[in-house]
Image (cartoon, rainbow, N blue to C red):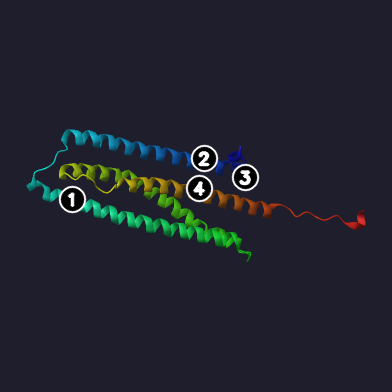
Amino acid sequence: MRSTSVLSKLKPNRALVLRLLVLVLVIILCFVIYHCWRRNRDAKQLIESTGQVLAEERRKDKWEEYKIHIELYKYYLDIFLKASLALLGITGGILTFYFNDKTGSGSLLKKALYLPLVFCLAYAGVYLYGAWLWCKVSVTVELLRVQLGIERVPDIQILTALLVVFGAVFYIIGVALLWFIWCDVRAGESARTEPPKSSPDPATQ
């Protein structure tokens, strides 16, 4: 009931767009999660069938490949944390300034909301696509672990989980910003189009 009241503030076509955006998020999340689960299942079967410790003379190239993947993991994780914190800081700063504004420049600040809106949706797309790609890297690292005879490796699948979670969070923030902008624009339009109420003339009473 509450979601219905929230969408009732929008025009029918805009409410439909928000419903479609939420549906797209659910479909993408289901696809990414299923893809990662299938990759892990196939990796276990591959390791059981072909995974074996390599001879000493064949380990050198595999060691180099393993080191490259681990360094990439550290690099991507560092970029992910810095980029996410930067976007959260920008979004929080703009929203705080918007809600606390008392100068009457609401229309100008309302346009500033499009900046975090675009970035949030772009980040969501990049993160979810990155999670889909990183599943392949996780499988490769697991196979290298078996071939090199390493007992434990860094849990690089945590990056996949972070990308999925933050991708969904930024997508939801983007949709929420879009809803807020549309509701605010409509409120401003209705305020402008509504004719002013005339006060009763005391002489006619």
Query: Is tag 1's residue or tag 2's residue first in the polypeptide sequence?
Result: 2
Which mark identifies residue 65? 1
Identify the residue at horizontal 28%, vertical 37% (top origin).
40
**In the image, farthest residue toward the bottom:** 103
**In the image, farthest residue toward the front:** 151
Which mark identifies residue 175? 4
Task: Please tell me whether mark 4 sits on a helix, a strand or a loop.
Answer: helix
Q: Tag 1: Cα neighbours inside 10 Å, few (<14), some, or many (≥20)? A: some
Q: Is residue 116 left or right of residue 148?
A: right
x and y percent of residue 74 in the render? 29, 55
Asked whether disc 1 touches disc 2, contact meaning CB atoms under 8 Å apart, the reply is no
Question: Disc 4 or disc 1, which is closer to the eye?
Answer: 1
In this figure, which residue is indicated by the disc labeled 2?
19
Identify the residue at horizontal 50%, vertical 56% (top origin).
114
Q: Is residue 119 left or right of residue 204?
A: left
Image quarter of the N terminus: top right
Q: Quadrant of residue 5?
A: top right
Asked whether disc 3 touches disc 4, contact meaning CB atoms under 8 Å apart, the reply is no
Report the front residue among 64 and 114: 64
Query: Is tag 4's residue or tag 1's residue first in the polypeptide sequence?
Result: 1
Query: Is tag 2's residue or tag 3's residue first in the polypeptide sequence?
Result: 3
Which mark identifies residue 9? 3
Query: Is tag 3's residue or tag 4's residue first in the polypeptide sequence?
Result: 3
Instruction: Tell me the amino acid under the disc marked 2.
Output: Arg
Instruction: Tell me the amino acid under the disc marked 3.
Output: Lys
Query: Is tag 2's residue or tag 4's residue first in the polypeptide sequence?
Result: 2
Whole-angstrom CA distance, mark 2 to mark 4, is: 10 Å
Asked whether disc 2 touches disc 4, contact meaning CB atoms under 8 Å apart, the reply is no
Identify the residue at horizontal 62%, vertical 45% (top origin).
9
Task: Please tell me whether mark 2 sits on a helix, a strand or a loop.
Answer: helix
